[in-house]
Amino acid sequence: MSLAAYCVTCCRRMGSSAPSPKSDTYWREIRNIIKFTGSLILGGSLFLTYEVLALKMSLTLDTQVVEREKMKSYIYVNAVSLDNRENLGITYQARKELHKAARKVLATSAKLFQNPFSDTFCTVDVEDHECPVWLLLRKSMSSDRAVRLQAVQEMSQAHHWHDYQYRLIAQACDPTTLIGLARSKESDLRFFLPPPPLPPVKEDFSIEEELRHLLASLPQTEDDECIQYFTSLALSESSQSLAAQKGGLWCFGGNGLPYAESFGKVPSATAETFCLEAIVKHSEIPTHCDQIEALGGLQLLQRLYQLYRDCPKVQRNIMRVLGNMALNERLHPAILHSGWVSLMAEAMKSQQIMEASHAARTLANLDRETVQEKYADGVYLLHPQCRTSQPIKADVLFIHGLMGAAFRTWRQQDRDQVLMENASEDEDRYTTCWPKTWLARDCPALRIISVEYDTNLSDWRARCPMERKSIAFRSNELLRKLQAAGVGDRPMIWVSHSMGGLLVKKMLLEASKKPELSALVNKTRGMVFYSVPHHGSRLAEYSVNYRYLLFPSLEVKELSKDSPALKALQEDFLEFAKDRNFQVLSFVETLPTRIGSMIKLHVVPVESADLGIGELIPVDVNHLNICKPKTKDAFLYQRTLQFIHETLAKDLEN
C-alpha cells in the first residue's frame, strides 16, 4: 500500500509542475522509482525463497543419515559388562589401535582381491575397530560357500572382542552361521543367545503330566509292537507315579519294576525316564517327529533338560530325541527357534564323552553346510566332532559286543578312583574313550564312528519283550544307518569286540549281495577282532543267575557252538574274506572273566577266536579288558595303531 501511494504522489508532482529546463529530470525520478521497487521485489523474493527452503528442510528426512544410523554398531544389552578385560585406559587404547591397524590390512587386501568395501556396507559411520566385525558378518552371508566358511572360522577364532560384539553377532547372524559357530571348537559361548523363555506350566499341571499328555497324543503305530509296548509301559508307570504324588502309597505290581526305597516316596525321574524312552522310539518315525514338534515337544524337552541336569539317563534320552528330530530338515527352523543350538553348543564343550557326542550328532545333523551325511540313532561321530580344515581320507568303525556300549566298551582299562576323577584333566593318563582321544590324535585324517545297539543276556531283561533281534536282523538295521552316514564313501577298517565281530561279518556278507551297498565292501581294507567267537562261546552254556538259565536271549543262543547260523556265517565269511584279500588282526583273552559273584568263565577260548586268516595274538587279560588298553603305550593299543597305519598307508598318503 505504501509503495502504491508513493508512486501516485510522484506522478501528480510531475503532472502539475512546470516543464523543467533540463530534460533529464523526468528520467531521474523514473530511475529512483525502479531502484526502490526492484530492491523491495528482490529482497522479498529472497526472503520467501529462504523460508520455503527452510520449511522443506525441516520436513524432509535425510535417507542417507537414516541408513548410516541403521548400520551403526548399536546393540542393547545389560549395562554391566560380562568381560572383565574391557577396562578403559592404556589397554583399551592399545586394543583400539590394534583394531585400526587390522582394519587397514583388511581394507588393503580387499582392494587387491575382492574389493568388498565398494558398497555402502563399508561407508558406515562406525568406530575403526568395529569394521572387521561387520565385515565378517557380511562375509558369513556371502553367496560363495568358501567365503562363508572362512568367515565362520575367523569368527570362532576371535577371542579379543568386546562382550557386546559377540552379542551383536549372536543377534545378527543367520542360522547357518550360528550352527557353524556351534560346531567350531574354539568358538566363544557369547556367540549364542540364551534360549527364549519357555511357556509357563499350566496351573495344576505338573511337568510329568505334560510329558504324559504328549506321549498319549502321539499316534500309535500298529506296525511297530515295541512302540506300543514302550508307550503303554510309560503311561502305566506315569499313572502310578502321579497317584503316589497325590497321597497314595506306592504300589508294586503292574510291570513288576523294582523301584521304591520306601513306601511313601516316588523315585526321582523314574516316570520321566519311561516316558522319554517311549518318545525316543516315536522319534525314529519322521511323521511322529512332526507331531512332537506340533505339540510343543521341543519346549517341554528343554524344560526337562534344564530340570534334570544331574540325571545322565534323562539327558541322554532327551538328546537322542533331538538328534532323531534333526534328521528331518523341515524341523530345523523349529529346533533353531526353540534355542536348542545354544544348549548343544554348550554341551559340545562338556568333558563328559556321552554328552559331547550326543550334542555333536545333533549339530552334525543340523549342519547341512559342511555335512552331507546323516547320523541315525546309535551312530556317533567321535572324530571330527567339530568343523575342521583337515581332509578326511578314511573311516574307522567301532562295533561293541554283547551288553556293550558305544563309549563304555572302548574306555581305558579301569584303574583307581583318583584317575577316574582326573580323567578330564589329563586324557593321556586316563581316557573314557580311547578312539576319541588317542586314535583321533594319532590319526587326525580319520573319521571315527562308534555304533551302539541294544543287547541282552536274557529275555528277562529285554527292553522290549516283543523284540527278538537276530544277528541277521541287526546287520540289516545297522547297514541302513551306516549307509545314511556315508560309510562306503571312503576306505575303511572295522574294529569290533565279541559279538560285534559277528555283526561285521554278517554286514559285509549282506552288503555283497546288494548292488547299492557294493561300495561298502569294495572300500573295506581290513578288520580288527577283539575276542570274537567265530566258532561259538561258552557264554550260552552259563548264566549270571537262575533266571538266565531258563531264558537266554536270542543273541546268546546264536553264540552257541552248535548254532547252525554261526557255522554258516563262519564258512561263508572265511571264503569271502580270502577272495577279497582282507587284512585281519585278531586278539584273544587268556584269562577267565568273572560273571556275577559266583562264576568265572573263559568266554572266548583261543581256538574260537581264530578266524582262519590273519594274525592271532593272545593277550593276558579277560574278555572285558581285551579291548581296553591299560595305557596309550600298551601293546594292545600300539599294535592296533600300527595295523591301522599299515592297512591304510596308501589311502592316507593320497
Image (cartoon, helix red, strand yellow):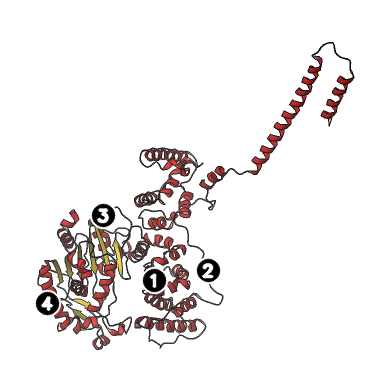
Instruction: Determine whether, in the image, residue 447 is placed left or right of residue 239.
Output: left
Category of crowding for the residue at label 3, using alpha-carbon neighbours closer than 10 angstroms: few (below 14), some (14–19), many (at least 20): few
Residues under labels 1 and 4: Cα distance? 40 Å
Looking at this rendering, what residue extends furthest in the top direction? 21
- What is the total number of numbered labels drawn onto the structure image? 4
Q: Is residue 342 above or below residue 600?
A: above
Label 2, secondary structure: give it: loop
Q: Amino acid at mark 1?
A: Val
Q: Which mark is residue 571?
A: 4
Q: Nearer the viewer, residue 197 or 30?
A: 30
Residues under labels 3 and 2: Cα distance? 44 Å
Category of crowding for the residue at label 1, using alpha-carbon neighbours closer than 10 angstroms: few (below 14), some (14–19), many (at least 20): many
Instruction: Determine whether, in the image, residue 2 is placed left or right of residue 276.
Output: right
Label 4, secondary structure: give it: helix
User: Do residues under tags 3 and 2 come within 8 Å of each other at their CB atoms?
Assistant: no
| Quadrant in which the N terminus appears | top right
